[in-house]
Amino acid sequence: MASDLELKAKEAFVDDHYDLAVELLTQAIQLSPNNAHLYADRAQANIKLQNLTEAVADANKAIELNPSLSKAYFRKGTACLKLEEYQTAKAAFEIGASLAPGESRFTNLIKECDELIAEESGAVPVPENTTSHDVSTEDVQPEKDVPELQSVTVAKPKYRHEFYQKPDEVVVTIFAKGIPRNSISVDFGEQILSVSINVPGEDIYTFQPRLFGKIIPAKCRFEVLSTKIEIRLAKVELIHWTSLEFSGGVIAPQRANSSSAMISAVAGSQRPTYPSSKPKRVDWDKLEAQVKKEEKEEKLDGDAALNKFFREIYQDADEDTRKAMKKSFVESNGTVLSTNWKEVGSKKVEGSPPDGMELKKWEH
């Protein structure tokens, strides 16, 4: 039962067995996937393990399932605070405070966020003894024996992804074909991208990198296409990202060239680059042509292939051809598609059902 696993997870947490707590809560979630408290509790364990992006994802899921769960906002704020996403953390704490007005921990953490935001902007210094608050245990009683259970196997990512960048934005592409729009969830933080694909009957796919640089969540957007998900991240600073994910090291920012877009495709391993006095030229026309060629040669099947074929005809057609296509399709109730305006322009196009079928007119 999920409740038994939840109780054992709390016991493991109290005994500082955070890995075991995550495993137990993961098993409980599989049995009760709509329980917001389980996601909030797993976020707490992930924070202890410093799995901060995973903690934010769990907190977001808990909020999605139960928007009035104050501890979910506390978990999200705590993880974002540790990730130095002070604006996002403050927003989460403020919502949590409105849901639990009697809890002073929200007020204290909002004040801490204000101080850190001010320090980051250079307005006022932050006292040296300011530290991030840790997650506290909540009404759990330890027991001596915690049973050993098998570890949960983490499935490998099923969708390939890559990115390229322009001076003011980074474009991330996840190659997921035929995914319904309502099965995709994308959240933006100050320096976090969280993508979740939940198709019924399949394992949930999650992609939650801490990004190389900070972004502007309000200006970020995504689009679901037939073969991929395209995500556009608006940069805070016009600097060149040497990778998509934050590496943890101190990196001297390299200003982006505003006169041309810079593209960096993600590869399995990056080859070292060395300084050179010879300028490197990129044939952008060739690169654009290559991208268009790949899209044109993309193999589709069924209705998607047919729709693509008709779109290409319509896109490249002159005005008379487009009028012929529209008129013939509408007047024939979708059974005729003509490109000859001279033939269909002066008469009504009659329906032409497939062999073996009969066209019937319905009276209203």
Image: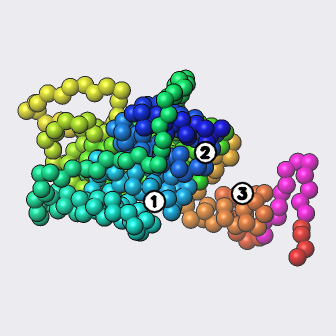
Quick one: label 1 or label 3, which is nearer the N terminus? 1
280 relative to 138 in the view: left or right: left
The C terminus: image quadrant? bottom right
Front position in the image: 31 or 84: 31
Q: What x and y, as percent, mark residue 141? A: 48, 41
The residue under label 3 is 337
CA–CA distance in space, label 1 to label 2 = 19 Å
The N terminus: image quadrant? top right
Q: Image point 14% across, 27% down: which residue? A: 274
Q: Which of marks 1 and 2 is in front?
A: 1
Front position in the image: 85 or 127: 127
The residue under label 2 is 33
194 relative to 64 in the view: left or right: left
CA–CA distance in space, label 2 to label 3 = 48 Å
Magenta stretch, main secondary structure class: loop
Q: Nearer the viewer, mark 2 or mark 3?
A: 2
Q: What x and y, as percent, mark residue 269? A: 31, 25
SS state under label 3: loop
Front position in the image: 73 or 277: 73
SS state under label 1: helix
Give, as a three-letter code, the residue at label 1: Ser
Question: Residue 70: which disc?
Answer: 1
Question: Which stretch appears magenta?
Answer: 348-360
